[in-house]
Each structure stands twice: as structure tokens, then as C-alpha cells.
Image (tube, rainbow, N blue to C red):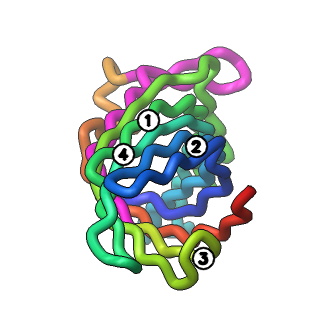
Amino acid sequence: GAAEGFVVGANFFRAQFPSFFFSAKGYYQFLFERHTYNGLPEEKIDLNLNHWGVAIDVGIPLFDLLDWKIFEGGIRFINAKLTNSITADSYESKNTELGYYFGSGVVIHAIKDYISIEGTVSYNVIKVDNIEDKNGNKISAKDNFNLIKSGSIISSLQLNIGFPL
């Protein structure tokens, strides 16, 4: 499947030079995925992968209003929650899981230094080994339950609003 969501974050700094730029950022991301199975009653399984992370990027200006983000890479600290609507079972990761990503993208400047749109395509690695309910019952990879497919391509589109200092 595919998870959808949104990100709230900020650049810690962005160093802009004539021939390249370098940024460091932090963010919190809300991700949600739902699978629906037709039956009587209809079953819904919801997966929440809310997490925070830090990242860096390095790029070059191509034109006045377009930059190429040559490399972006970051680490994520992930918490997973799985809920079944019929059984009312709810499973959560008890430990924060570590993931990472790396990719490339473009930045289109609508108003230089103030408003830009950033698109990124990256390779994402997430590993959630097992999750458990409030009684300690676990679902794990050993149960042939593939909670998270690791090693997938992700894409993101974000609106940046800047306040240069």
C-alpha cells in the first residue's frame, strides 16, 4: 500500500553560497494508511507511522528560480500503531524504531528566499520488527505478518515559507 500524510518542520540553517547550498532540518511527520476488506461487517485496518527526524541536504542553483537538491539524507525515529476496526485490537511499537532515507530533488523558488516548492524522491528504509497490544501480545515478522515493507521509493512535495535572518 501507500501511506499518506503531512510534515511540519523547520530548517535549523541554510547556508547559501554562489555555487552551492547546504541545509540542516528537523521535522515531525504524520503518516496514515488504511486497508479496507469487504465483508459483513466491513473490516478496516489502520496503520499510523508518526515520527520525527533530522536531515541534511546539499545542492546547486541551476537557474535563478530553480535549484537541484543533489543529495538529501536523514534519519527517522518511528513509532508504529496498528488498529483493527472489527476486533478493536490495537498494537503499538513499544520501542522507537530507527529508519533512514536518501534521495534527490528540485526546489522551485516562487519568491526567492521567502516561498518555494520542494519536490523530493528518495529511497526509504524502515524496520518495525514487532508491535504488541496492551497485554504484551506481539505481532512479529515471524508470524508472517508484513507490517512494514522496507526499502521502498517515496516521494514528497512540500511548501517552504522562509524568514531570512
Q: What crowding class fits label 1: few (fewer than 14 Cα within 10 Å), some (14-19), or many (20 or more)?
A: some
For disc 1, the marked residue is 74
Which is more toward the observer, 107 or 136? Answer: 107
Q: Is residue 103 left or right of residue 86?
A: left
Element carrying mark 2: strand
Residue 70 image position (x, y, % from top left): 26, 51
Picture residue at 55% right of the left edge, 44% below the top = 49
For disc 4, the marked residue is 58
Against 141, is 64 above or below? below
Is label 2 or label 3 in front? 3
Q: Looking at the image, tell me whether mark 2 or mark 3 is earlier in sequence order.
A: 2
Is label 1 or label 3 in front? 3
Against 27, is 164 above or below? below
For disc 3, the marked residue is 115
Boundaries of the magenta span: 119-140
Q: Is residue 142 left or right of residue 111?
A: left
The amino acid type of the residue labelled 3 equals Ile
For disc 2, the marked residue is 25
Element carrying mark 4: strand
Which is more toward the observer, 57 or 137? Answer: 57
Picture residue at 59% right of the left edge, 22% below the top = 96
Q: Looking at the image, tell me whether mark 1 or mark 3 is earlier in sequence order.
A: 1
Q: What crowding class fits label 4: few (fewer than 14 Cα within 10 Å), some (14-19), or many (20 or more)?
A: some
Q: Looking at the image, tell me whether mark 4 or mark 1 is earlier in sequence order.
A: 4
Is the residue under label 2 in contact with that under label 1 (CB below 8 Å)?
Answer: yes
Q: What crowding class fits label 3: few (fewer than 14 Cα within 10 Å), some (14-19), or many (20 or more)?
A: some
How far apart are the two marked residues, 1 and 2, measured between alpha carbons?
9 Å
Q: Is residue 113 something one can see in this rendering?
A: yes
